[in-house]
Amino acid sequence: MTTLSTHSTHSTHSTHSTHGGGGSYDGTPSLNDYSGATGDVLLAEALSGTRAEIRRNVSVATAVRDWTTTGDRLPPLEDPATLVQCGANVRGYLCEFELISRSWFRCPSEDGGDVAELSFTHEQAKGSLAMEPLLTMRRPSKAIFERQLEIVALRQAEGDVDPRRAEVIVQALPHLAFFSTILNLQPSRHRATLELIDVALQFVMLAVMRFKYALACPRPVEYSPELQPMLLTPAHPSLPMGHAAEAYMMAAVFQRLLNQSDTSVTAVQLRRLAHRIGDNRVVSGVHFPIDLIAGRLAGEAVAECFLAQCCGGDWSHWEFNVSKPVVPTSQSVAGAELAALDGCKRVASFHQDRPSSPILAWMWSRAQAEWAGTNFSR
């Protein structure tokens, strides 16, 4: 599935787009050519010649437009209504700034341990602002990772990867096609949704990459040359898992867009898919199982915060702290509540009565409108 992506996210994921359409229609120069993206000198010369001819005897340009009827008649300041006139890439930059400007990251923490922490600005009921922890992660010990290495090797020996080869290879790239099989995502019908998803993915991957760098957890192949993963190991640290964070972020955003309960058929399928995508990274040998748990936590914690900025609601301070070897089964990660997973703990909760960003609220309302009348009732 081709996505109408506006953002660079993880690994080989999408890049900021600069133009909506490309190519020519019936041999006629397109707006993509007009943008300068193709370097079409012939079109530029033709436009200049036409302008010179139709403006013959016109020496000055006449202003013909007012944007408002009051003041200096320019467009109003900070008006979300003007976002529709911006390109998707520009809206993406604006949303990134809205989210990152409200974030703070620190490592090591004040207790001197192997801890990294992401905080976010909480807009309180009376309009005051407070920087509150969003996600705290403590690096697992080397002994825990060595125990996890045995699990990865065992799953390889048991042939878990054999029936998944196609999935593993395809999911090295963006995985929206897999979500489309559940939701019937259509590039022509869900442009605003895909744009919102790109913003969400960009936010979660910026957070994940910052944690990866701070915690500096080596990959499985760096522990043992006998592991030999079937994919090229990405050139960044292991924990938390980016693919899991992205997949669980998408599952959470889609669930809220479609107004689904946690137990609905659609929500359950979305979470199972998210786990399957992450688990495929484990069986391929590029991640530890504990990376998947941390990735799910990062994805769902950041998703809570992201959704609160878009449409109000609750978000929490979550903590990841594994102090003993973890042997997660597939079902324990896919089906369990987040707080029931090893090392995951909700520390505090915060409530926002309304969206913190008019820009994100506008993006959300456009995406939500695309699903109006869609029957995902159970």
Image (tube, rainbow, N blue to C red):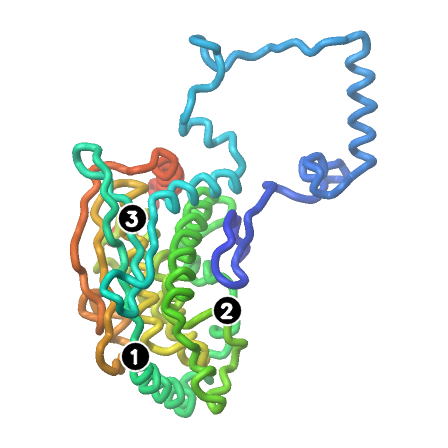
- Determine the residue positioned at 45% across, 50% down: 198
- Determine the residue positioned at 71% across, 38% down: 36
How far apart marks 3 and 1 lie (CA) works out to 27 Å
Pick the residue in front: 99 or 130: 130
Q: Position of residue 188 (x, y in %)?
A: 51, 45
Whichever of callouts 3 and 2 sits on the residue coming sooner in the sequence is 3
Q: Position of residue 378 (x, y in %)?
A: 24, 54
**Dot 2 alpha-carbon crowd within 10 angstroms: few under 14, some 14 to 19, many 20 or more:** some
Q: Is residue 289 above or below residue 182?
A: below
> Callout 2, which amino acid?
Ala
> Callout 3, which amino acid?
Phe
Q: Is residue 225 left or right of residue 367?
A: right
Of badges 3 and 2, the one in the foreground is 3
Q: Which quadrant of the structure image shows residue 163? A: bottom left
Is label 3 in contact with label 2 (beta carbons under 8 Å)?
A: no
Q: Position of residue 9 (x, y in %)?
A: 48, 56
**Dot 1 alpha-carbon crowd within 10 angstroms: few under 14, some 14 to 19, many 20 or more:** some
- Determine the residue positioned at 23% across, 64% down: 111
Q: Which residue is mark 3?
A: 120
Whichever of callouts 1 and 2 sits on the residue coming sooner in the sequence is 1
Q: Position of residue 55 (x, y in %)?
A: 77, 13
**At numbered mark 2, what does the secondary structure look like: helix, strand or loop?**
loop
> Callout 1, which amino acid?
Ser
Q: Is residue 6 above or below residue 82?
A: below
How far apart marks 3 and 2 lie (CA) works out to 30 Å
Q: Which residue is mark 1?
A: 141
Is label 3 in contact with label 1 (beta carbons under 8 Å)?
A: no
Q: Which residue is mark 2?
A: 172
**At numbered mark 3, what does the secondary structure look like: helix, strand or loop?**
strand
